Structures are given as C-alpha cells and as structure tokens.
Amino acid sequence: MWRPSSSCALSDGLVYRFHREAADRNGRPVYRRSDGVVWCRWLDGAGWCVVDGEDRPNGWPVDGSPDGTTTPPATRWCSEKAGRGHLYELRPGQ
C-alpha cells in the first residue's frame, strides 16, 4: 500500500523523501520532495513523473506507468539532471 511519505534511494546512496500534498491533480495525488521544489505527479500523456518547479519532467518509472494507476509505481525509476542519468528505487514510506 502506498503511504503519504515515500522515499527514493538513488544509485549514489542518497535518500529523498516525498510527502503527499493536500491538493490532488487530475484525480491523482501529488507528492512533494521534502528538501526542494520537486514533485512526483501524474502528467497526461506521460504518466507518473518527477517534475521540477517549472513542471518539466525529469524522472520516470523505468517500465512506464500503467493507465489507471492512482499512485506512483514502487519500482525502479530513472532521471536526468545536468546531463547525467540516475537510477533509483521508489519505495512506499514506512
């Protein structure tokens, strides 16, 4: 089960925590990273993504986002930042 607080363990060992926002978008929850202006949310046409403060996607589930899912998939994700790729694991909060 997805919990309001989720964490991402990056391939370099860093851990980021996401907390559910009060408002939903498109009938799905929105999660904000606790240390910055980064969200995990559903984008029409792209599925679940991690987006920056300008709503630009920069992280996605490796295997995509199945239609109809109401929470981000707990699986491997990849992201791009400053020309570098990162692989991380999205896991439900504890």
Image (tube, rainbow, N blue to C red):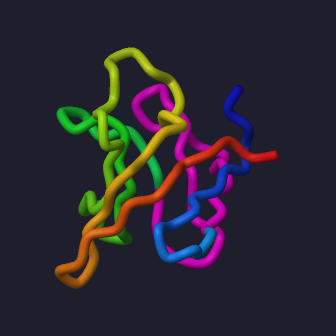
Q: Quadrant of residue 51?
A: bottom left
Which residue lies most toward the top here? 68
How many marks are shown on the rendered structure? 0
Q: Residue at x 32, y 18 (%)?
A: 67
* Residue situated in front as seen by the camera: 43 or 66: 66
- Depicted 35 relative to depicted 59: above or below: below
In the image, the segment drawn in magenta is: 16-39
Q: Is residue 20 magenta?
A: yes
Image quadrant containing the N terminus = top right
Residue 83: x percent and y percent? 17, 80
* Residue situated in front as seen by the camera: 40 or 22: 40
Which residue lies most toward the bottom here? 82
The secondary structure that dominates the magenta segment is loop
User: Could you tell whether 66 is left or right of 6 in the image?
Assistant: left
Residue 35: x percent and y percent? 61, 77
Q: Residue at x 48, y 39 (%)?
A: 75
- Depicted 87 relative to depicted 35: above or below: above
User: Could you tell whether 78 is left or right of 2 in the image?
Assistant: left
